[in-house]
Image: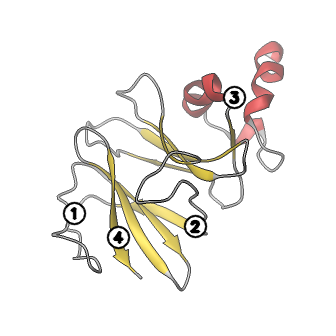
Amino acid sequence: MFLSLVVGTALYGGDVSIFNVPGPVANCLTPLAGQFKIDGRINPFYLRGDFDGDGRTDYAVLITNSKGERGVAICRAAARAPEIVGAGFVLNRSADFDFDAWMVFLKGPVEKGVGEGPPPRLLGEAISIIWSESASALLYWDGRKFRWYQQGD
């Protein structure tokens, strides 16, 4: 156990304790330790839900890359590797997700967003990403990949 704690510390930012990270999250993100760190800038720094609708627990974790770009790593129970949005990977014309709040959006109807097409039909829970007093969006699974649906501006 001690060896895994020492090796795994490259994954944790200074504001995240290894003891606050669930085992499935640590296992999912350990292969990315040289590229990303868990980012504790928002409490909670991870969300738990069924994001792909398969009935199993998935996790979304705040991360930062070596350039300081912020994003989300999504550890789906059905996937071998995490899916990265932001943190250098572009989604919705942004590679740096500097939002200041987030929460699980329960599976159900989605209201029409600002300037967007029809609302998505959620297969599982979604991730509500919020820029306080500015904008919000849903990050949701469409059966093949995570997509962005702008909620407000």
Label 4 neighbour load within 10 Å: few <14, some 14-19, many 20+: many
The residue located at (59%, 24%) in the rendering is 27
Circle 1: residue type: Gly
Return the residue found at the far bottom: 133
The secondary element bearing badge 4 is classed as: strand
Sequence-wise, the earlier of marks 1 and 4 is: 1
Q: Which mark is residue 108?
A: 1
Sequence-wise, the earlier of marks 3 and 2 is: 3
Please give left or right for residue 129 compared with residue 112 in the image: right
The secondary element bearing badge 2 is classed as: loop
Q: What residue is pinned by disc 3?
A: 33
Label 2 neighbour load within 10 Å: few <14, some 14-19, many 20+: some
Q: Which mark is residue 150?
A: 4
Q: Are circles 1 and 4 on residues that touch, CB within 8 Å?
A: no
The residue located at (40%, 59%) in the rendering is 92
The residue located at (22%, 55%) in the rendering is 122
Sequence-wise, the earlier of marks 3 and 1 is: 3
Q: What residue is pinned by disc 2?
A: 99
The residue lying toward the viewer, choosing from 116 and 73, is 116
